[in-house]
Image (cartoon, grey):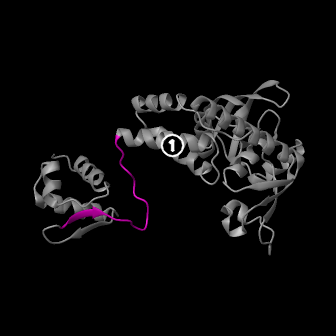
């Protein structure tokens, strides 16, 4: 392999495999001399890649963690696996990773060859993810189109379905994507209405970037606060939750432990505000694996009873089939 840039990329790809590579094996793989491998290792180090060398009969080279994240080289299978995982994280708003998933997915899909993009789409269409009770999942392609337009910045057109079902066409200057943990929202300046607007992404179809660049306007508040106020203005409500668990506070999962009433013993009582659909919250409480009693609100208690009856019925059907 005489092309130095191509050889360096191939060497870097090998070193990103979590193992130690003897210099002789690297030389054999790349069809060069051991001396060339040593020179190429030095070139990678000059480029900022932390390549560590060990001496002795069992010695060799390996890439170690450095101060910054180096570019990764992926084979076809790795790229498809990562893209599918990112689509799941982005499309179903997994708390804590959803925004990073969209940014990473937008970068990855921009460089994926068409054959791999087709494989990712096929895998995505053949799988189903369990979403929250309101079913507010979105097409990851919509998210990546919007994310790219925000980063551009580039004006965006799309079809939008309002709360009453009416359909409109919008031309906007996208500002930020905001996730609430169960839904995605686009904060944008609506050019036809000459005002800032919040759009539920699961109601958006046919989005496309127009190619027209723009100078971003300054939103009068944080995008998170803007979305929060918009939700309140449209009747989205929170409700007080109180649940008693037949366990100590230390046994609760982290998301409930912070809401536990201080100084309590067993049962541990948690109190918090929620926007989640009662059906989803009941399922999430059941997944703790701890016995619990819903003290408030009544809608959550009813959802928990319904869920319990369904699970009991499923168990009875299974026993009858086994018998």
Q: Is residue 64 magenta?
A: yes
Report whether residue 249 is seen: yes
Q: Is residue 153 left or right of residue 305?
A: left
Q: Does 191 sit above or below residue 233?
A: above
| Residue depicted at 46% across the width and 44% down the height | 82
Residue in the foreground of this view, choosing between 249 and 146: 249
Residue bearing the label numbered 1: 85
Q: Position of residue 87 (x, y in %)?
A: 55, 40
Q: Does 231 sit above or below residue 23?
A: above
Q: Which residues are magenta?
A: 59-75
Q: Position of residue 27 (x, y in %)?
A: 14, 54
| Residue depicted at 64% across the width and 45% down the height | 93
Q: Looking at the magenta stretch, what is its main secondary structure?
A: loop
Q: Does 55 sit above or below residue 124?
A: below
Q: Position of residue 209 (x, y in %)?
A: 61, 33
Q: Does 69 sit above or below residue 54?
A: above
Residue in the foreground of this view, choosing between 48 and 121: 121
């Amino acid at each position: 392999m005489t092309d130095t840039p191509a050889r360096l990329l191939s060497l870097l790809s090998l070193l990103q495999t979590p193992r130690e590579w003897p210099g002789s094996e690297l030389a054999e793989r790349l069809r060069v001399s051991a001396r060339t491998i040593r020179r190429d290792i030095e070139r990678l180090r000059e480029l900022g890649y932390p390549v560590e060398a060990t001496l002795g009969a069992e010695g060799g080279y390996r890439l170690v963690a450095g101060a910054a994240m180096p570019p990764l080289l992926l084979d076809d299978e790795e790229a498809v696996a990562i893209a599918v995982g990112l689509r799941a994280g982005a499309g179903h708003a997994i708390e804590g990773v959803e925004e990073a998933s969209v940014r990473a997915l937008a970068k990855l899909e921009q460089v994926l060859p068409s054959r791999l993009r087709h494989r990712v789409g096929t895998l995505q269409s053949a799988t189903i993810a369990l979403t929250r009770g309101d079913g507010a999942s979105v097409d990851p392609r919509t998210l990546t189109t919007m994310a790219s337009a925000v980063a551009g910045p580039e004006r965006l057109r799309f079809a939008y379905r309002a709360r009453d079902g009416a359909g409109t066409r919008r031309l906007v200057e996208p500002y930020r994507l905001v996730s609430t943990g169960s839904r995605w929202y686009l904060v944008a300046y609506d050019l036809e209405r000459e005002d800032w607007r919040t759009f539920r992404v699961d109601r958006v179809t046919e989005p496309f970037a127009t190619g027209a660049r723009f100078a971003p306007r300054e939103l009068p508040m944080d995008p998170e606060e803007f979305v929060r106020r918009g939700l309140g203005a449209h009747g989205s409500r929170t409700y007080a939750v109180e649940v008693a668990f037949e366990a100590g506070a230390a046994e609760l999962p982290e998301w409930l432990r912070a809401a536990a009433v201080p100084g309590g013993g067993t049962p541990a009582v948690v109190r918090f505000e929620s926007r989640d659909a009662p059906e989803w919250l009941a399922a999430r409480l059941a997944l703790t694996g701890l016995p619990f009693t819903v003290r408030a609100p009544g809608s959550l208690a009813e959802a928990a009873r319904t869920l319990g009856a369904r699970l009991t019925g499923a168990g009875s059907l299974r026993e009858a089939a086994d018998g």
